[in-house]
Amino acid sequence: MTSFGWRESPSIRQWLFTEPYRFEFIQAVRLLEQFTPSTPLALGPDPSKEAVQLRSHVGFDFAPSELRTFLPPQDSRHPPELVVNLYSLAGGASPLPDWVAELLQAQARNRDHALRDFFDIFHHRLLSLLYRVHLHHRSWLEPIQPQNAQTGADVPTTRRSRNKMSQYLLAFSGLGLQELQNRLSIPDEELLPYAGLFWQRPRSLVGLERILEHALEIPVASRSLLGSWNRIEPEDRTRLGVRCSSKRRSLPLRSRNNALGRTLVLGTRTWNPQGRFDLILGPLSFAEFQKLLPGGPTNRRLIALVHFYAGDVLEVHTHLRLSAADVPVSRLGRSRLGWTSWLKTRHLTQAPTVTLRHP
């Protein structure tokens, strides 16, 4: 006999309902909670409205797995029932004497389940608390509980609650304080997969490449130590003792920053040999290219990720390299001059590039 799902693609829900003994207790209950996230265990006054009703098997046998059977709901008013081989009040490893388990078995043979149902009131509560204890001390198991009926990526970040693991990862990324969260142009949840790279000091250009490749799903390369001109503020420039005439009177200007060999600077800008790095994105399809242009949805994510990772000290030039085969023919219409229009009369041999400057 073949195993369940052989030569098929069953869902995890079908697998759990068909072969529950292949799952661990914590794993199964966590899946059932995710199927109905509005009815978590041990957090409400009415167990009949929770995601699953937990029962414990009564017997003296040695169970091969934590789960025994799964009983689907009888109707929409009753939750499914999960019979487990854990923490039974009656049985071989229970605190009560053996005759209690024998009595329950005898009543079950006569289809009398009153005493068993009474015990299951305590079984459900104990097993639910056991599950909650596991979630409390294993934060990676705790699911995100939505604050309203809406779920999905279109729900604003401020309307969703985060679990403890998300808070830990945000702290690694530098957003541990509540005042620093929800201030970026992208949801904070988009930073969670890259918390390890944000935590590294000093941050590397290779780390930024990995983040952009994964987040944007496009090839990314980089060049560093390209240099840039930094503007010298007027109050920091060299000024000799001169007079400035005005309509009312001549006001003397104090000389400053004019010590030869120490503070004297000729000019209004200075060269910083490590003040700029470049990012090369591509080759890109025309659809990807348009999304990365200013005003596009991907451009906003690109700028937010680059500035959050690299800061605003260095100058960044992003080169969008369009695939030569995807360059459209020039036509009058909605083409953006300087962005998506080329004088093309034959197939291009070199990929055109558009440079975006991020100060």
Image (tube, rainbow, N blue to C red):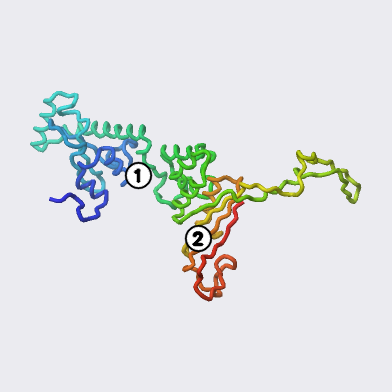
Amino acid on which disc 1 is placed? Ser
The one nearer the camera, 196 or 120, is: 196
Marks 1/2: CA distance?
36 Å
Q: Which mark is residue 38?
A: 1
Q: Is 4 on the left or on the right of 172, as rendered?
A: left
Q: Is 269 on the left or on the right of 203, as rendered?
A: right
Q: Is 234 on the left or on the right of 150, as rendered?
A: right
Q: Residue at x 35, y 44 (%)?
A: 38
Residue 114 in sight: no
Amino acid on which disc 2 is placed? Lys
Q: Where is residue 100 shown, x and y percent of the image?
A: 13, 27
Judged from the image, the secondary structure of the residue bearing numbered disc 2 is helix
**Mark 1 vs 2: CB contact within 8 A:** no
Q: Residue furthest front?
A: 261
Q: How many marks?
A: 2
Q: Where is residue 67 shown, x and y percent of the image?
A: 21, 38
The one nearer the camera, 225 or 122, is: 225
Q: To which quarter of the image does residue 332 belong?
A: bottom right
Q: Where is residue 337 shown, x and y percent of the image?
A: 59, 68
Please name which of the two marks, 1 or 2, marks the residue nearer to the observer: 2
Q: Where is residue 318 shown, x and y percent of the image?
A: 55, 55
Q: Which mark is residue 286?
A: none
Badge 1 crowding class, 10 Å Cα cut-off, few under 14, some 14 to 19, many 20 or more, is: some
Judged from the image, the secondary structure of the residue bearing numbered disc 1 is loop
Q: Which mark is residue 291?
A: 2
